[in-house]
Image: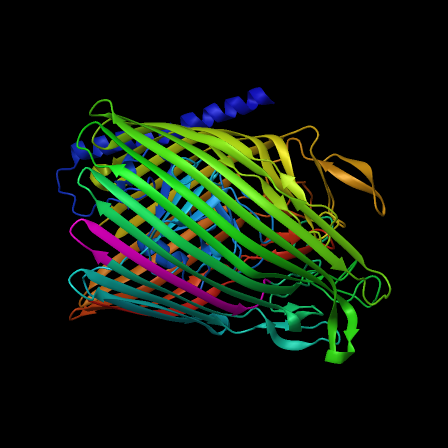
Amino acid sequence: MKAMKRSTLATLINATLFSAVAGTSFSSIAAENDTSAKSNQLEVIQITARKRVENAQEVPVSVSALQGDNLDAYSSAGMDIRFMNAKIPSLSVESSFGRTFPRFYVRGLGNTDFDLNASQPVSLVVDDVVQENPILKGFPVFDIERVEVLRGPQGTLFGRNTPAGLVKFDSVKPSQEFDAYGALSYGSKGSTDFEGAFGTGLTDRISTRVSVLWQDKEDYIDVKAPGFEKENSLGGYSEKAARVQFLYEGDDFTGLLNYHVRDLDGRPIAFRANLIEAGTNNINPLYDNDVVYHDAASRATQQVDTQGLSLKLEWDLKEHTVTSITAWESAEIYSRADVDGGYGNAFAPSMGPGVIPFSSETADVIPDHDQLTQELRLSSNFSGDVNYQVGVFLFDEDLTIESYSFDTGAYDAANSNFGLQNGYAVQDQSTSAWAVFGSLDYTLTDDLKITAGLRYSDDDKEFYAKRTKTPVPFTGASDFKEGSANPSDSHVSWDLSAAYKYSDDINLFARIANGFRAPSVQGRILFGDEVTVAESETINSIEAGIKSDVLDGQGRVNATVFYFQMNDQQLTAVGGGANFNRLINADKTTGYGFELDTEWVLTDELNATFNLSYNNTELSDNDLAVAVCSQCTVTDPTYMVQGPNGPEPRAILDGNSLPHAPEWITNATLRYSKELEGGEFFVYGDVSYRSEINFFLYESVEFKGDALFETGVRAGYAWAEGDNEYEASVFVRNLFDEQTVIGGVDFNNNTGMLNEERFVGAEFKVRFF
């Protein structure tokens, strides 16, 4: 088996590099035979993947950038940050909270944990500030200049919790030039989406930019549970966000102040009881996207408030640049949902749809959260062969989580309401971390550059949890439980990369890197009896690739092959008989694959992109086993253990792939434009595909998600009048209305969640100069 996998890896490497070299050869032939000048060439993409502005084609890192038309099209229809799912090679995004709490996966590495203190191996950095808590990661995407996805460990420059990679957002910055725009769209289910920005110089040294977003969608899902019928009860939201920036530009000093705020008042994602047919992974034929059977829908809500303030100061000392980034982030959330997705239960029939073993209505709350970060960095600007960066990073976070459970069969006479509280738990977590880091660039020859990086990180957590639980409506019985943990660890991360300029149009690179994720704590003891701790995970990764501009600047082919081994990978055993998460460590996880990014100018009127990735992941641990679902068909080998209510099965995970880790991701775009008198007509189309996935660590028939294929089309007309530009367009997302189960709840019934259905809308934009 291992020999066959090595053979597969060799085949993938050869095929990927051959495709890039073949494209380069074709470019050379075309250049020899083409005597006409090329007027329509691909733009140079500038990125800040290594904390300085560089040409993406010259950076020895596997990185993809999303900007311009692609970013506008993908994020239309009022989409939240999940629009990035399968739009970039090796990147997938999902959430069981809906518009909040996105979970990112890069090269198959991620974290399925749904508790509000969950750490993730993919870091999110927005305007140079790490967003550690999962609620911070859901900030809306608007007035964004560029999105970068860095694949592989990024522990040297970006630090803690980046063993899988990094997603980086850069908003449009203030400038002295006047610039303003507004975009208003209206679409399916009464959705309204407005975003706009205004920027100008206030003095000859101070400029500002104000960016705003407002998204609104009416409730459209009807509740048809007997006794709880109500039309238009779920599915809606009202989202508001703003960003205010002030930029000071002196002769040798710049200062950027950034304040951002978010206010979401909406509904949680719709859980649907027994959505998955037993014995298959098919959607129940009785399913109706606009109907649920919740007995707790009237109380379902999701309220999120976040805000943050950052100050970036930069001094230009000619041969050096000093950078200081000081930031504060804060989040509050109250989310309450009918997790069982149905009504009644086996103890209080009637019930449905299907069998509901027990009612589960829960609420999760962050009443208090503060994150403080400080980075101080010194970068050289020498004209010679050697340059470097050195710096220090400080991180401090205080977090309180409250969890509630409710008996939906209990009646609260005082408030004339079902859903009497019968459980309460609180978690308090404090995290302190610091690091020192450095990176050295050395030009060996005009064509060969070497980069070496080193980072020492120290991380410390203090965690305490307690619960009080009363089994309502029974009286006289309650229990109290508490637990604590104080894990700490330190680690030296490193990377070594080389970039070789093979020709003016071809760059080769190789990179070896090490990263780690600090210890994690999970204490959702409202439904469990223990606080679990996952030890630090470490990863060693090797990758090599080619970045090439072909067809005389009218094509771009970038390809990367990679292999990694992760030791003591932190995994979350979600559910499996209880609404509870347990942290475990896998002895070893291996992964390999390739990524292909391409862009093409086909004609003066036709542009295209095509991207592809393959990821193979495998757990290797003979002793690793987890609890399994209550009603599904497990396909892993199992054995029995004695549980509190009798014998319980455990699934052996050795040899399994990771959850939410598709082997294949591919996407393509095509843009056609035609100049007409007075303006331009355009049509933009995109398709994305990700192969099937497992929802949990164990494998089962029901909780294997089918492949997801989505198509979008946008068509419109753009014109200019005076100094202003206008655009009117119509668009559709998920054109063929592909409905696929994208997540499940296994501790009760075969509950599932679905991707967004077809969305049709129209948009009008205006830009002022």
Residue 703 image offset from top left, x and y in percent: 66, 48
Is residue 266 located in the magenta-colored stretch of the structure?
A: yes
Asked whether residue 240 appears in the rendered view, the answer is: yes
Q: Nearer the viewer, residue 663 or 429?
A: 429
The quadrant the N terminus occupies is top right
> Looking at the image, which residue is at 29% across and 56% down?
256
The span picked out in magenta is 248-269
Residue 675 image offset from top left, x and y in percent: 21, 61
Asked whether residue 727 appears in the rendered view, the answer is: no
Residue 388 image offset from top left, x and y in percent: 28, 32
Relative vertical location of residue 592 with respect to residue 530 in this rendering, above or below: above
Q: Nearer the viewer, residue 666 or 191?
A: 191
Q: Main secondary structure of the magenta part?
A: strand
Is residue 579 located in the magenta-colored stretch of the structure?
A: no
Residue 586 image offset from top left, x and y in percent: 63, 33
> Looking at the image, which residue is at 17% across and 32% down?
383
Q: Nearer the viewer, residue 412 or 12?
A: 412
> Looking at the image, which residue is at 84% across and 46% down?
644
Relative vertical location of residue 673 with respect to residue 49 in this rendering, above or below: below
Locate residue 422: give its quadrant: bottom right
> From this viewpoint, which residue is outermost toward the top?
3
Horizontal placement of 327 versus 340: left or right?
left
